[in-house]
Image: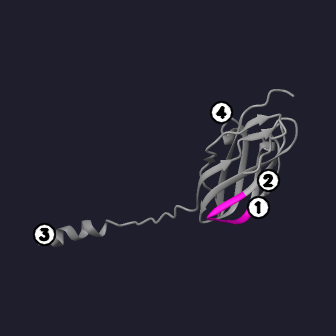
Amino acid sequence: MRALLLLPLLSACSLTLEVAYPGPRIQALRTQGTYCADRNTRLDYRLDLEGRLDALEFFWVPEGVGPWQARPEEVFRLFGPILGPEVRGYLEVTPSGEVRAVYVAPQGIGIEPLPDRRLWVRGMTAGVYGPYVRALNLVRPDSTALCDPGW
C-alpha cells in the first residue's frame, strides 16, 4: 500500500546527467627572457598541449595588463589545427608591442622606456574559447646585440 502512495511522487522525479568534456588543456607556456628595444624580435615560445586546437590566440601585453585589455595590434589569432603534445614557434613583435606574425615552427635561433611584457594564449575548439594561459616568465626589453637569443 505504501508503495502505491509513493508511485505518483516517484514518477514526477527525473534524473539528468550532464557530461562535460574538459577540452584541450594548455600548460607551461614559456618564452625567451628578452625582446629587442630597438628593432623587431622573433620571440620564441613553447607550450604543452593536451588535445587539439582549432585556433590559438596570442596576447603580447605589458606586464600587469590582462589579455582582455590588449590593444588590437597586441593580439594575433593563429588558425590550426594545432596538435600537441608540445607546440613550439615564435612571434614577430615590434618594440611598440605590435604582433606582426606568429609561426608554429621553431626558428632555430631565435628609445623610449619600454615595459616588461608577458605572453598570454588561449585555445579555441569548435568555436569555444578555453581559459587564458599566462607565460611562466616575463620578457624584458634589451638594447644589446644579444636581445634575441636562441634557446
Q: Name the N-terminal-most of marks 1 and 3.
A: 3
What secondary structure is found at the residue carrying circle 4?
A: loop
Q: Which numbered marker is on residue 105?
A: 1
Q: Nearer the viewer, residue 26 or 76?
A: 26
Please state which amino acid type lies under the numbered disc 1.
Answer: Ala
- In the image, residue 123 above or below residue 68: below
Please state which amino acid type lies under the numbered disc 2.
Answer: Ile
Q: Tell me the magenta residue range.
A: 79-88
Q: Tell me how far mark 1 sits from mark 4, CA to CA.
A: 28 Å
- Asked whether the residues under the numbered discs 3 and 2 touch, taking CB atoms below 8 Å apart as contact, a structural biologist would say no
x then y, percent, for residue 93 = 82, 45
- Asked whether the residues under the numbered discs 1 and 3 touch, taking CB atoms below 8 Å apart as contact, a structural biologist would say no
Residue located beneath label 4 in the image: 64
Task: Considering the whole magenta stretch, tell me its main secondary structure.
Answer: strand
x then y, percent, for residue 35 = 78, 40
Residue located beneath label 3 in the image: 2
Q: Nearer the viewer, mark 1 or mark 4?
A: 1
What secondary structure is found at the residue carrying circle 2?
A: loop
